[in-house]
Image (cartoon, helix red, strand yellow):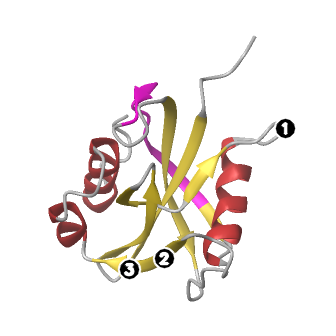
Amino acid sequence: MTGPENLRVYGLLLRAGKVLIAAEQVAGRAVLKFPGGAVEAGESPEMALAREFREECALTITPLALIHVPGTLLSPWTGADYTPLYYRVAGDGVPRTPVHEPLETAFWEPDAAIATGRMAVPEIVALRRAITGAEGQR
């Protein structure tokens, strides 16, 4: 039995009414997403999420709740299928992006991030669920 196609995990870290955003280039487009990435062979989604946060922003996080499972989707950025999972996470410290990572991380006001038009719909749904506490709704 095989798992979902191109399983990806993303974490929403909220602090003082802001969310940690990763700004990066995906298929030549400037997008805003949450720290995260691919689940590698032998990893659980939670293990992959913790690894991605260490790699992308030098933070140790704890997954708190799975808040959005939209199923397998067609990426508006790459045109490829992917299966994202969105978690609310907790973590302390200041995000520091290593030089070799092609992204920038910063805390954003949720409405300002959404208003850029650079976020995909699943990210927006996950963000709204995280800030309203609607984590039981998948």
* Residue drawn at 25 percent across, 54 percent down: 128
Q: Is label 1 in contact with label 2 (beta carbons under 8 Å)?
A: no
Q: Position of residue 89 (x, y in %)?
A: 53, 62
Q: CA distance from mark 1 to mark 2?
A: 28 Å
Q: Position of residue 25 (x, y in %)?
A: 45, 60
Q: Is label 1 in contact with label 3 (beta carbons under 8 Å)?
A: no
Magenta extent: 63-75
Amino acid type at mark 2: Glu
Per the image, the residue denoted by label 2 is 104
Q: Name, please, the residue furthest toward the bottom.
A: 94
* Residue drawn at 27 percent across, 43 percent down: 121
Q: Name, please, the residue furthest toward the right.
A: 42
> Quadrant location of the N terminus?
top right
Q: Upstream in the sequence, badge 1 or badge 2?
A: 1
**Residue 71 visible to an observer of this rendering:** no
* Residue drawn at 46 percent across, 25 percent down: 72
Residue 114, above or below 138: below
Per the image, the residue denoted by label 3 is 107
What is the tally of numbered marks visible in this picture? Answer: 3
Residue 92, above or below 75: below
1 relative to 23 in the view: left or right: right
* Residue drawn at 17 percent across, 68 percent down: 111
Q: Identify the secondary structure beneath mark 2.
A: strand
Q: Upstream in the sequence, badge 1 or badge 3?
A: 1
Per the image, the residue denoted by label 1 is 42
Amino acid type at mark 3: Phe
**Residue 128 visible to an observer of this rendering:** yes
